Image: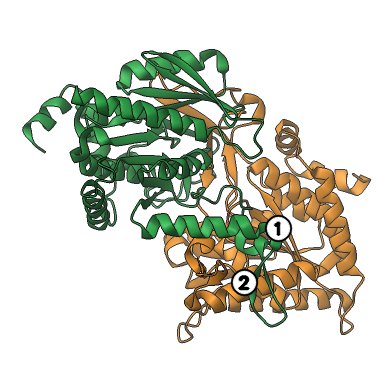
Chain colours: A green, B orange
Amino acid sequence: MDATHSEVLQETPSVEIKSFFDSAPPLKDADEISRKLKEFVERNSSTPENGRVTRVVCVTSGGTTVPLEQRCVRYIDNFSSGHRGAASTEYFLKAGYSVIFLYRRGSCQPYCSSLPDDPLLECFDITDDSKIQVHPSHAEVVKRAISEHRAAVVGGNLLKLPFTTIFEYLQILQLIADSVSKLGRSAMFYFAAAVSDFYVPWELLTEHKLQSASGPLDIRLAQVPKMISVLRKAWAPMAFCISFKLETDSNILLAKAAMALEKNKVHMVVANELSTRKDEVIVVAKSGNIVVRRDKAQPGAEVESPLVELLVDRHSAYIKEAGV
Amino acid sequence: MDATHSEVLQETPSVEIKSFFDSAPPLKDADEISRKLKEFVERNSSTPENGRVTRVVCVTSGGTTVPLEQRCVRYIDNFSSGHRGAASTEYFLKAGYSVIFLYRRGSCQPYCSSLPDDPLLECFDITDDSKIQVHPSHAEVVKRAISEHRAAVVGGNLLKLPFTTIFEYLQILQLIADSVSKLGRSAMFYFAAAVSDFYVPWELLTEHKLQSASGPLDIRLAQVPKMISVLRKAWAPMAFCISFKLETDSNILLAKAAMALEKNKVHMVVANELSTRKDEVIVVAKSGNIVVRRDKAQPGAEVESPLVELLVDRHSAYIKEAGV
């Protein structure tokens, strides 16, 4: 950590953050992940196309888990199919971005959102001469999923990194931030993951499975330190940052989103309500709020399409600002 | 509920059970599930093959969730890939059983356990002439998964019913028990699911997302009533019942399994320790304990193969007993 880095960290509640990372179990494959990130960022910073440096967005997706035991049998989870992150990844790729997709294991994958839960068992058949055949009704969407996904991965425009726990998520996020910080304003963070607000510090976890014989169970959860504000201040201060605020109560949604904008110093907050989140979101920014709706006249149109379009546009403006 | 049914229920802690079911949100598709079960049980009780009445096993699989909010954003989950239940289903089908597979949405499916996480994206390719092609390295296992799965479903030997929450799980389990109880001793329950021991009664749940601004969060969880003992006493008293006990601490495992055998009056308890559960389990019964190990000399051999073999054998003996 260089001097500026540690100086800035001191402005944040560094005790909490230090205690979170100190208490976390060591990240497996940290070296492998760092290597992949280094390669990805190098490739994407050395290939200017049409005179424009490639932009890189880190899309986080799915929910994080909070273990309640060290040898984990029980955990707290956040509901999230990962659909928002997966769909947005497709639109960012289409817009020419390279995407680091930081996703919950088992959550929705880019190009797969219109497929059934178990595509292999539900879309395929074996012919009489023992060949694998896709059902005609699913053929187009299955082909598109396989080919576009492969094109993005093979072309070096999509790097997929899985996580399960809140510990893995924040540790990998720090590695990503460290890597993309050298891209300056060309980097974006799009925090669509549903990150736990509460956790049990690793050292307070019981080693073994909690026993159920002795009546009701009381659990005390500590707050997860707000890492986005640390990322903004120290990890990747030039990156364009979009966070999300999900509530079930529409009465408090916009106020909470505005508070998050202020507190975490992100560039925009996407406010969404659980029940209407697939039709409409409100992008909250200092310059005012913008309602983004999916085009209901167009079958299959997703709200992520105009949302990503708006963000790409604002990101362009943010990059230009620096050149003035 | 008939007279005997309600009489016996009174011996169990019926207040707890009544309160659990009363507090549960109503099960969606209850009529559809009942219809499927009726059809499945009728088909499988009317086709004696080789003079033997078809046996039906209900395999439960994967972990149940416990919502922490009514409009659920956060929940407690039990770790379980569903591998044990999915693999066991294959061996039960092979042994001539018909299987009701009560599984957690998104958990491991029968015939799919040796496939990668996202088989569609990892096993397939698009050829130059735009055809879907399976990678040669995965072809055999993909073909087997599709064909055997389809054969079991189309042949009417495999009924798959998904759940997510503890409420759905126990409500569907009661419907299954009601349906298969008429098969008497030919029915088996194989409780491989990781069912929550603790829950928050629905009426105590906050309607909206818990707010994180106000410091640490304290959660008080009530014990889930032990439904297996109700199933044994009242729902399907003649069915052969196998429950599971998972612990991370081998020192208490066998004692806890023996206690569960006694308390729930099941026929056998499969004791497994988290770290060795894929190699070895101990079947705890009144007649003594039996260690079951996978055949390490045989590549790909699973512990579920000898385990199911043993249980089928014991189930046969249990059916014969009645005829004496």
**Number of residues whose C-alpha sits closer than 10 Å to that of mark 2, classed few (under 14), some (14–19) or many (20 or more):** many
Task: State the separation of the CA atoms marked 1 and 2.
Answer: 20 Å
Q: Position of residue A258 (x, y in %)?
A: 41, 15
Residue at 58% in and 56% down: B107
Quarter containing the C terminus of chain A: top left
Quarter residue B90 falls in: bottom right
Query: Is A70 left, or right, of B28 in this rendering?
Result: left
Residue under pointer 2: B145
Residue at 38% in and 32% down: A312
- Confirm whether residue A226 shows in the render: no
Q: Which chain hosts label 1?
A: A
Q: Position of residue B63 (x, y in %)?
A: 57, 51
**Number of residues whose C-alpha sits closer than 10 Å to that of mark 1, classed few (under 14), some (14–19) or many (20 or more):** few
Q: What element does badge 2 sit on?
A: helix
* Mark linked to residue A137: 1
- Confirm whether residue B5 shows in the render: yes
Tell me the kind of residue under disc 1.
Ser
* Mark linked to residue A300: none
Q: Which chain hosts label 2?
A: B
Viewer-nearest residue: B13 or A76: A76
Residue at 82% in and 78% down: B320
- The residue furthest front is A50
Quarter containing the N terminus of chain A: top left
Viewer-nearest residue: B267 or B312: B312
Q: Considering only vertical position in the picture, is B162 above or below A270?
A: below
